[in-house]
DNA sequence: GCGCCAAGAATGGCATACCATTTTCGCTCT
DNA sequence: AGAGCGAAAATGGTATGCCATTCTTGGCGC
C-alpha cells in the first residue's frame, strides 16, 4: 500500500486519521472490514501508537467501531442508521440554509447559482459523476455559508458517514429529474431570500432523497 | 488526587475519558487549564498511552483542545461559541421534541409532566439547585424519547460543552418566572400532541435562555 | 464423523523508553 | 539595566516491548 502523504507539518496521528477517513469514506475499506493494528501500521509505515490514536478519533466520529480486545472495524451503516442520520442531516442542513439565506452575500448566492447551472449541464449530459460532485459541493457550500462553525463541523461529520450511501444512491436514482427540479426550487428561494421557503424546500428535498434507502433493501 | 473508579471491565481509556469528561463538565478543571500528560498520568495512576488516547477522544468531542507540541488544554468557550453551539442545540432539541411528540407513549408524557411539576415545586421553593437538575433531566428525557440515537448522541455532546455555562446561567437568571411559564407551554403542547407547537415553543424557550449570555459579558 | 477442548498463534491493551520540539531561565554583551 | 541568545529542562510525539485476552486449529473422545 502507498504511504501516508499529507500536509507536512501536521502530527502523524492527523495524517493517519485523514488517510483512513478518506479511504473509509471513499469505500476503499468496506464496512465490517477489520482494521488490525499491526498490519495497518506496517502498511502505513508508522508505529501502532499513532495508529491507535487515529482509530480512537475515527471511532468518536462514528466511522469505525472499536470492541474491547477485538479491535477496530469499519462501521456498518444499517438501514435504520441511514434513516436516523439522514434525518439529523436534513435538520442541520435546513437550519444552515436558513442562516445562509440571511447571512450570505449576493456574490455568494451568485456563485451558488453558477454551480447550480454547472450541475444542470451535467444533468442534461447524463454525467452522473460530475453531477454528484457538484451536488455535494453545493450542499456543502450552503452549509459553509451559514457561518456557524459548529453546525458546519457536525454537518461534515454526518455527511461523511453517509457519503458511501449517498454515492450509491446517486448511481441508481430514477427520480433524477425530480431531484433536479427540487434543486431549482431551492436556488430560487435562496435568490429570493425567502428564509422559511429555503428551509422547507431543502428539508423536502433531503427527506425524499433518503427515504427510499432508509426503507429499502440492505445497502451492501 | 483520587484514583480512577469506573465500571470495572471497561478499557482504561474509557475510564480515563469518562473521568476527565466528568471533571471538565463539572468545572473542576477550569477552561484554559493545561492538562500535562505526565503529571495527569501519575495523578490518575495510569501511563501516558491511555491518557493520550482519552485526550484525543475528548478533543474530538470538543471538550479539550490539543495543539501540536504544546499539549492539551480544557477548551475555552467564547461568547461566540456559546451562541453557535446554543443555536445548534436548540435546532436539535426542536427536532427531537417533534419526534417525541409523535412517538412517545402517554406514559412517557405523563412522566414528563410529573417531572415538570416536581420542578415547579422547586421553583416555588426557590430551590435553584434541584430546579436545575430537574430541568436538565426533562430536556434530556424529551430528547431521549425521540428514539433517534444519532440525535441523542449529538445533543448529549453539545449539551456537555454548554453545561458549565448553563449552570452559571441558572444561578443568576432573573427571568426565572418567564422560563417557568415557557416550560408550562411546552408541556401543554406536548400533552396536546401538537407537534408544530412543541417545536416552536421549545425553540423559543432555548433561544431566550442563551441569547443573553451569547451577547453578554465574558463567561469566565 | 462431529463436536468439544486445549494449546499455540494472533491481536489488542498498556507501560516504558527514546527522540523532537518548545519553553524557560540565566548569562552575556551592548 | 535591558535585550538577546543559548543551553538545559520540560513536554509532547513516536516507537517498541511485554502482558492479557481472544481467536484458531488440531487432536481426542464420544
Image (cartoon, coloured by chain):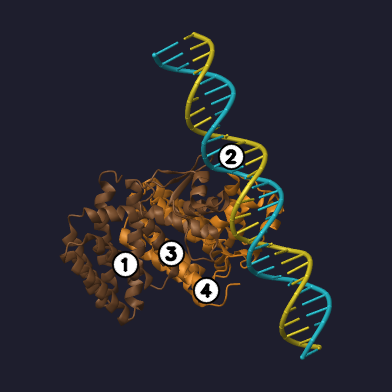
Chain colours: A orange, B brown, C yellow, D cyan
Q: Which residue is found at the position 49% from the left and 56% from the top?
A: B16
Name the secondary structure under disc 4: helix
Which quarter of the picture shows residue B120?
bottom left
Q: Could you classify mark 2 by the number of other residues whose Cα lies within 10 Å: few (under 14), some (14-19), or many (20 or more)?
A: few
Residue carrying label 4 = A79
Which quarter of the picture shows residue B188?
bottom left
Name the secondary structure under disc 1: helix
Q: Nearer the viewer, residue B148 or A25?
A: B148
Residue carrying label 1 = B137
Query: What's the distance in space between the residues labelled 1 and 4, CA to CA?
Result: 30 Å
Residue carrying label 2 = A9
Q: Which residue is found at the position 44% from the left and 69% from the top?
A: B149
Marks 2,3: beta carbons within 8 A: no
Whether labels 4 and 3 belong to a single chain: the reply is no
Q: Could you classify mark 4 by the number of other residues whose Cα lies within 10 Å: few (under 14), some (14-19), or many (20 or more)?
A: some
Marks 4,3: beta carbons within 8 A: no
Tell me the chain of label 2: A
Report x, y in % for residue A183: 44, 62
Q: Which mark is residue B153?
A: 3
Q: Quadrant of the C terminus of chain A?
A: bottom right
Tell me the chain of label 1: B
- Badge nearest the viewer, 4 or 3: 3
Query: What's the distance in space between the residues labelled 2 and 1, CA to CA?
Result: 44 Å
Tell me the chain of label 4: A
Report x, y in % for residue B81: 36, 49
Could you tell which of marks 3 and 1 lies nearer the N-terminus? 1
Can residue B81 be seen here? The reply is yes
Can residue A122 be seen here? The reply is no
Query: What's the distance in space between the residues labelled 2 and 3, CA to CA?
Result: 33 Å
Query: What's the distance in space between the residues labelled 3 and 1, CA to CA?
Result: 15 Å
Amino acid at each position: 500500500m502507498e504511504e501516508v502523504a499529507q500536509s507536512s507539518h501536521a502530527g502523524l496521528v492527523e495524517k493517519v486519521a485523514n488517510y483512513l477517513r478518506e479511504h473509509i469514506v471513499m469505500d476503499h475499506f468496506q464496512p465490517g472490514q477489520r482494521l488490525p493494528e499491526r498490519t495497518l501500521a506496517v502498511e502505513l509505515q508508522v508505529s501502532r501508537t499513532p495508529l491507535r490514536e487515529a482509530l480512537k478519533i475515527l471511532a468518536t466520529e462514528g466511522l469505525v467501531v472499536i470492541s474491547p480486545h477485538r479491535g477496530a472495524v469499519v462501521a456498518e451503516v444499517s438501514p435504520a442508521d441511514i434513516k436516523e442520520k439522514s434525518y439529523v442531516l436534513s435538520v442541520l442542513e435546513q437550519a444552515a440554509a436558513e442562516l445562509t439565506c440571511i447571512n450570505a452575500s449576493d456574490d455568494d448566492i451568485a456563485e451558488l447559482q453558477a454551480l447550480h447551472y454547472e450541475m444542470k449541464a451535467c444533468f442534461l449530459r447524463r454525467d452522473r459523476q460530475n453531477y454528484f460532485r457538484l451536488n455535494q459541493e453545493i450542499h456543502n457550500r450552503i452549509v459553509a455559508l451559514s457561518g456557524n462553525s459548529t453546525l458546519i463541523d457536525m454537518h461534515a461529520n454526518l455527511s461523511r458517514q453517509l457519503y458511501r450511501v449517498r454515492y450509491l444512491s446517486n448511481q441508481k436514482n430514477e427520480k433524477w429529474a425530480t431531484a433536479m427540479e427540487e434543486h431549482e426550487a431551492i436556488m430560487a428561494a435562496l435568490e429570493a431570500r425567502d428564509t422559511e421557503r429555503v428551509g422547507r424546500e431543502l428539508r423536502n428535498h433531503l427527506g425524499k432523497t433518503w427515504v427510499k434507502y432508509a426503507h429499502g433493501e440492505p445497502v451492501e
